[in-house]
Structure formats: C-alpha cells, structure tokens
Amino acid sequence: MFAERFVRARKASGLSMQALADQVGLSANAIKKYEHGDAMPSSSNLMKLAKALNVRSEYFFRPMKVEVQGIEYRKRASTPQKTLAKIHGDVLDQVERWYELLNFFPDSAKPIKEFMLPNELPALVDDYEDLEAIADTMRDYWGLGLNPIQDLVDTFESRGLMVILTHVDTDNKFDGLAGSIEDKPLIVISGSQNGDRQRFTLAHELGHLVLKGRLTDEMDEEKACNRFAGAFL
C-alpha cells in the first residue's frame, strides 16, 4: 500500500527521485527502495516526505478504495508528461475520495443513472454536417429541450458521468480529458479556465464519448468534437 501511494504522490508532485531526495536530505537510492517496497521511511523522514510532496502523512496509508488500472484519457499533444502525471495523480486522488463518500452515503448514488447513449446514433459518421443532428439527438435523449443548459456539471452527473475539476497548474496546456475509471465514464476539466470555456470543454469531452468508434478515418476527431460541442450547447 505505502509503496504504491508513495510513487503516485511523487509523480503527482512532478519531482524526480533525485529531486525529492535532495529536498528531504536522503539518497535517491533510499527513495527507490521506498517505491519498490524494499524499505520504509522512519517517522521523521515520513513527515519530511509528506511535506515535500504536499500531502498529509495519512495519505500514504489510506486504504485503496478503487481500482485505477483502467483509466484512459485524451490529452493535448503539447501537454508535458510531467504535467500529465500531476493531473493523473490529482484525478485518482479525487476519484478515491468520490468513491469513499459514496461508501459513507450509499443512498446518494441511487438516483444516478447509468450513462447510456441513444440507439438512434449512427454507426458511422463521415460528414461534419451530421454532428448537429447527433447533438440534437443527445439533447432529446436527455430531455433537455431547446433552451440553454443552466448547470452542465449537474446535467452530466445526473446522467451517469463523473466530472472532476483539477486545479493542477498546467500553464494553459491542458483543457480536459475524457475516458473511464472503474467502467464509469469520466470527464476532467481544468479549473484554470473561465466558466464559458469550461462549458465548451465539457461538451467537447462529451463529444469524445458519444463519437468514440463512430468517425471514419477521414474525419478529424478534435474538429468533430468541437462541432458537436457548439451544436450541443
């Protein structure tokens, strides 16, 4: 348990083994042993590590509540790997706490529907002009009518989508991602965006979930999701 969480915290911090070792006055080899489960830090070193990684010491021993191996997500090509590691760590931490709250309040999960797509969606999409009709189909399926959607996050969550806001500093190189965790659809958006941009990103990421496996090779997925988002909103 400790080794897995320690690795996650270090990667989420953006620190290399050597950089972390330098901060806390240990050797990189000691950090490596902690990550491989070959050794445990003393209580004093544990406090130093927690401070350097900006987590509470109990974080390292928190029981794992959710399997996270299946997470997949889309990213900007320009997003550095170090930034993606920070986002990944933040997402997993928030998801764990989300499931922990559901365990405390299991009745709160009952009204949440399973995320489903309408049967009327076309199997293949080969024309950008078709995306407006697909967006209309989703709005009809969700009973949204023709008016602007007041609360997009609530709309998504009440229909089985997990929405996470990450405040990791991405230097404007990350907008959002779509994927799944524990077989539950997941959308993550950057907290550094303004409200209008967040709404568009949410709709864009929904487009990735709706259009997954439907676009022909000639279609650009990012462009298609932008067209979908504009029509959906």
Image: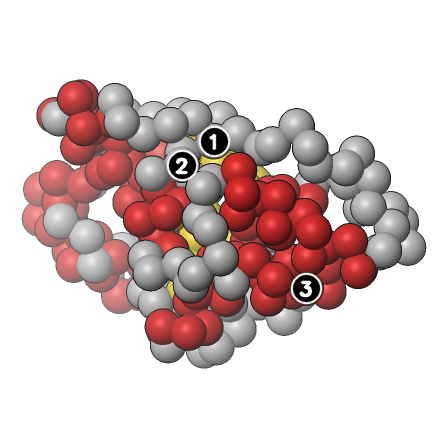
Which residue is identified by label 2? 159
User: Is residue 214 something one can see in this rendering?
Assistant: yes
Whichever of labels 1 and 3 marks the residue nearer the N terminus, that label is: 1
Looking at the image, residue 117 sits to the left or right of residue 126; the answer is left
Residue extending furthest toward the right: 218
Give the quadrant of residue 211.
top right
Quadrant where the N terminus is found in the figure: top left
How far separated are the C-alphas under marks 1 and 3? 22 Å
Q: Are marks 1 and 3 in contact (CB under 8 Å)?
A: no
Q: Amino acid at mark 1?
A: Phe
Residue at mark 2 to residue at mark 1: CA–CA distance: 6 Å
Q: Earlier in the sequence, mark 2 or mark 1?
A: 1
Which amino acid does the dot numbered 3 rest on? Answer: Arg
Image vertical order of residue 70 relative to residue 42, above or below: above
**Pointer 2 with pointer 1, Cβ within 8 A:** yes
What kind of element bears circle 1? loop
Query: Label 3's element?
Result: helix
Q: Report crowding for label 2: few under 14, some 14 to 19, many 20 or more residues within 10 A (C-alpha).
A: some
Residue 8 appearing in the image? no
Q: How many marks?
A: 3
In the displayed structure, 167 sits above or below 61; it is: below
Quick one: label 3, few (<14), some, or many (20+) residues within 10 Å?
Answer: many
Residue corresponding to mark 3: 227
Q: Which residue is mark 1?
A: 115
Location of residue 162 in the rendering, given as x and y in whole percent from the top left corner:
38, 41
For label 1, the crowd category at 10 Å Cα-Cα, with few meaning under 14, some 14 to 19 and many 20 or more, is some
- The residue sitting at 45% across, 42% down in the picture is 143
Mark before the other along the chain sequence, 3 or 2: 2
Quadrant assignment, res 36: top left
Mark 3 → mark 2, Cα distance in angstroms: 22 Å
